[in-house]
Image (cartoon, rainbow, N blue to C red):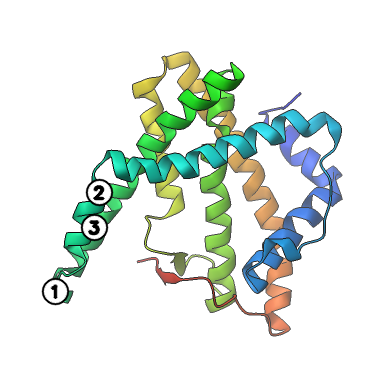
Amino acid sequence: MYSVDKDEVADRIRAKKDVVERFADVVLAYSISGRPSNARQYYVESEYFALSDTIRESMECFVLGHEYGHVIGMHLGEAARSAGMLAADEVDEINYNWMQEHEADIYGTALTLQSIHRERRIEPAMCFIGVDTFFSAMDVMDKATSLLRSGDENATTLGSHPPSSQRREVTRRFLDRILDPEHARSAVELAESLQFAMEQLWSATRPLLMSAMERGATAAPRWSVRNSG
């Protein structure tokens, strides 16, 4: 049974030290070496198989659906034309690309909900779970790599996409347009609970990352960043 009560979630995280250890291990491995596979191997307990499998499948569908969203939104031709824009137009280009990314997120979310529901016949909240978790995971990696590079977890964000927290909020608001109010509320409630859990885990991981940084650890070269401002 998954609880959305924040006090219960926080108590569970405090009681299960291995949860924090596993989370921190993969964040440090991914941010420092660029390879999440460098984290220690572990296996999901049987009672969590269904939940973890749903999160994984929903996340994978969204990542693929987002790219299809660029095709549906006919962004590819526009991106090619904008590639030759002058530096003076850089700000306009970035804003326009962010609009495309948000549109692709919306298409990707709709495709994910349709695909997961059609295959698994589960509630929309569970279909949406991987979409929101993807943004929370990206937000953690933004913070981890920024911390390693500058000592400030909010100084930079990864790549050219809008901040993950912004993408998450835009996508949540979109649910009201494709789901009935009850299902939309349920999906956001579950998503907020998972976001809270991720934030608690990040808070426990931050000191470990700072210790690694003091010992000379830096962000892997593969991470492309830009100033958050």
N-terminal label among 2 and 1: 2
Where is mark 2, residue-wise?
A: 75
Could you tell whether 210 is left or right of 154 in the image? right
Label 3, label 2: how far apart the Cα atoms are: 6 Å
Frontmost residue, 161 versus 115:
115
Check disc 1 and give the amino acid type: Ala
Return the x and y of residue 183 as percentages of the image width and height.
49, 17
Return the x and y of residue 103 as percentages of the image width and height.
30, 41
Label 1, label 3: how far apart the Cα atoms are: 17 Å
Residue at point 36% right, 36% down?
106
* Tag 3 secondary structure: helix
Where is mark 1, residue-wise?
A: 88
User: Are circles 3 and 2 on residues that touch, CB within 8 Å?
Assistant: yes
Residue at point 41% right, 14% down?
180
Residue 161 disc label:
none
Task: Judge whether residue 131 can be spotted in this image.
Answer: yes
Where is mark 3, residue-wise?
A: 79
Check disc 2 and give the amino acid type: His
Residue 178 in the image: above or below residue 97: above
Give the quarter of the image for residue 151. Answer: bottom right
Could you tell whether 83 is left or right of 1 in the image? left
Label 2, label 1: how far apart the Cα atoms are: 22 Å
Return the x and y of residue 109 as percentages of the image width and height.
43, 34
* Tag 2 secondary structure: helix
Residue at point 67% right, 56% down?
203
Q: Residues within 10 Å of mark 2 (few under 14, many from 20)?
A: some
Frontmost residue, 9 versus 63:
63
Give the quarter of the image for residue 205. Answer: bottom right
Residue 187 in the image: above or below residue 92: above
Check disc 3 and give the amino acid type: Ala
Residue 215 in the image: above or below residue 43: below
